[in-house]
Image (tube, rainbow, N blue to C red):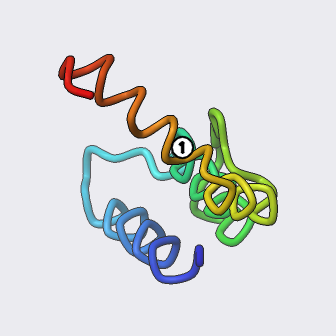
Amino acid sequence: MGIVEIDDFAAGAMALRKMAWADTSRVGIYGTSYGGYSSAMSVLRYPELFHAGSASSMVSDWRFMTRLILSGIWIYWKRTWRVMIAGVA
């Protein structure tokens, strides 16, 4: 987890170097939830490419996330979101 996609983000940042309009000395990355984890990992693994990062609501302890999913809370939230968004129970 956090290997292939981070390498893909890095490849995208490296591709920016070929673009005349891109200022690659100021590349940043952001994300929420798993995207927050990915943005933090991108900055940690490729500090020479990503000069800023924002990790909003990131999952930082996967042990807790596993317990959350296995405990059934995830099922509750999934149903709650379905009701809130679509009005379907």
The quadrant holding residue 1 is bottom right
Q: Is residue 88 above or below residue 22?
A: above
Left or right: residue 30 compared with residue 83:
right
Left or right: residue 4 compared with residue 62:
left
Three-letter amino acid code at the position of disc 1: Gly
Return the residue nearer the eye: 39 or 26.
Answer: 39
The quadrant holding residue 80 is top left
Q: Residue at x 42, y 45 (%)?
A: 23
Q: Residue at x 26, y 44 (%)?
A: 21
List the single residue furthest toward the front.
89
Query: Around disc 1, counting alpha carbons within 10 Å, would you say few (fewer than 14), some (14 to 19), or many (20 or more)?
Result: some
Q: Give the total of numbered labels.
A: 1
Q: Residue at x 25, y 52 (%)?
A: 20
Q: Is residue 17 above or below residue 80?
A: below
The secondary element bearing badge 1 is classed as strand
Return the residue nearer the eye: 6 or 76.
Answer: 76
| Percent position of residue 8, x then y | 40, 75
Q: Which residue is mark 1?
A: 28
Q: Residue at x 32, y 69 (%)?
A: 15
Left or right: residue 88 compared with residue 11:
left
| Percent position of residue 3, x then y | 57, 81
Quarter of the picture holding the C terminus: top left
| Percent position of residue 67, x then y | 75, 60
Q: Is residue 27 above or below residue 11?
A: above
